[in-house]
Image: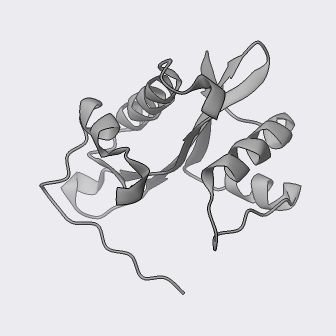
Amino acid sequence: MVRPLAQSDFEGALRLYQTLTRDPVSVSTSIEAFLAVLNHAGTSIMGAKVNGLLVGMATLHLLPNMTSGGRPYGLIENVVTDTDYRGKGIGRTVLQACVEHAKFEGAYKLMLLTGEGRGAVGFYEKLGFTGYEKHGLIYRF
């Protein structure tokens, strides 16, 4: 079952965030930082639990827009599945929940970035994401 995460999911989410990140990116261990994400307008963290354990999640940001008839666009970030549950459809199920939520909210597109070294491009392509239409660029501070 996939649902939007709540404050009570903090410990499980923190565990997954720590699985996701690599140096030099650090993870805030602050409940306040987690609540800031959960309470941000247009943002949802969709999560999947198995036997009460949070095993997969993805953050969906729906952002207002002036083009495309004023319909919002979505940005998906921090997609992660517990290493013991990979290959079981958890990530696909979480991402499909994000897609459905964005579609329900009237978004006209979804975007995400993935690192080339993570080997996830094929996973995202199987779910309908394409990399040929536009190129993602990052400016880091």
Residue 37 horizontal/vertical position (percent): 68, 55
Residue located 22% across and 62% down the image: 67
Residue 114 horizontal/vertical position (percent): 39, 55
Residue located 76% across and 12% down the image: 51
Residue located 40% across and 57% down the image: 117
Of residues 124 and 72, the one drawn nearer to the viewer in this rendering: 124
Name the residue at the left extreme. 132
Q: Quadrant of residue 21?
A: bottom right
Residue 28 horizontal/vertical position (percent): 78, 63
In the picture, which quadrant includes the C terminus? bottom right
Indicate the colouring scheme. one colour
Give the side of residue 129 with respect to residue 77, left or right: left
Compared with 105, 38 (above or below) is below
Residue located 20% across and 46% down the image: 130
Compared with 119, 136 (above or below) is below
Residue 19 horizontal/vertical position (percent): 67, 47
- Res 127 visible: yes
Q: Quadrant of residue 41?
A: bottom right
- Res 47 visible: no
Compared with 110, 98 (above or below) is above
Q: Quadrant of residue 48?
A: top right
